[in-house]
Image (cartoon, rainbow, N blue to C red):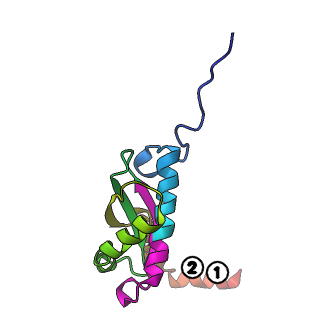
């Protein structure tokens, strides 16, 4: 009697955003889209997208929507708007280079992980600035 085992490759253990796991196919397509979009952004001669990078692309299971997470030096919404202005060109590049039947609708977002990291860094810098030694403590530190 043959023994059937479950396939371990169905869910991904990374969790992804929001704690939900994707499947291998959507992860692979997301990675391909990330490479294509990042490459196309380098080809666009527009200062509004010059310092924008693609951090991740999440594709839904139906392959109809793709959430593109972006980062830039100042994490401004204007950078996302600059990329949105070139959405047609980016979709054409995906249609040319990706081997998928239908180009998914693209949603551009500032990467929330980078926003959270920046916020934590700002909080830590604020704590460091608030930590002021009194004159007595400064003298004690110098004597040691």
| Residue 141: in magenta span | no
Q: Nearer the viewer, residue 97 or 5?
A: 97
On screen, residue 129 versus residue 12, left or right, reads left
Residue that mark 1 sits on: 141
60 w.r.t. 81: above or below = above
* Magenta-colored span: 37-58
**Quadrant of the frame with the N terminus:** top right
Q: Quadrant of residue 83?
A: bottom left
CA gap between label 2 and label 1 equals: 6 Å
Mark 2 touches mark 1? (CB < 8 Å): yes
Give 22 or 77, whichever is nearer the viewer. Answer: 22
Crowding near the residue tagged with mark 2, few <14, some 14–19, many ≥20 C-alpha atoms within 10 Å: few
107 vs 2, nearest the viewer: 2
- Residue 27 coordinates in the image, percent (x, y): 50, 51
Indicate whether residue 41 is drawn in magenta: yes
| Left or right side of 56 for 79 | left
In the rendered image, which quarter is residue 95 located in?
bottom left
Is residue 100 at least partly visible in the picture? yes
Q: Residue at x 43, y 55 (%)?
A: 100
Up the image or down, 71 lies above or below 67; here it is: below
Q: Which residue is mark 2?
A: 137
Could you say where residue 55 lies in the image, as x and y percent from the top left? 47, 67
Residue shown at 39%/64% (left/top)? Answer: 68
- Residue 87 position, x and y percent, is 31, 72
């Amino acid at each position: 009697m043959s023994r059937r085992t479950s396939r371990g490759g169905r869910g991904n253990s990374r969790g992804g955003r929001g704690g939900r796991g994707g499947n291998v196919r959507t992860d692979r397509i997301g990675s391909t889209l990330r490479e294509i979009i990042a490459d196309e952004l380098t080809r666009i001669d527009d200062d509004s997208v010059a310092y924008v990078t693609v951090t991740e692309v999440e594709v839904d299971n139906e392959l109809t929507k793709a959430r593109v997470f972006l980062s830039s030096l100042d994490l401004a919404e204007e950078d996302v708007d600059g990329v949105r202005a070139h959405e047609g060109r980016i979709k054409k590049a995906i249609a040319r280079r990706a081997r998928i039947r239908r180009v998914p609708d693209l949603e551009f977002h500032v990467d929330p992980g980078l926003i959270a990291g920046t916020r934590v860094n700002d909080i830590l810098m604020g704590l460091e600035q608030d930590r002021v030694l009194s004159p007595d403590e400064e003298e004690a530190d110098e004597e040691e």
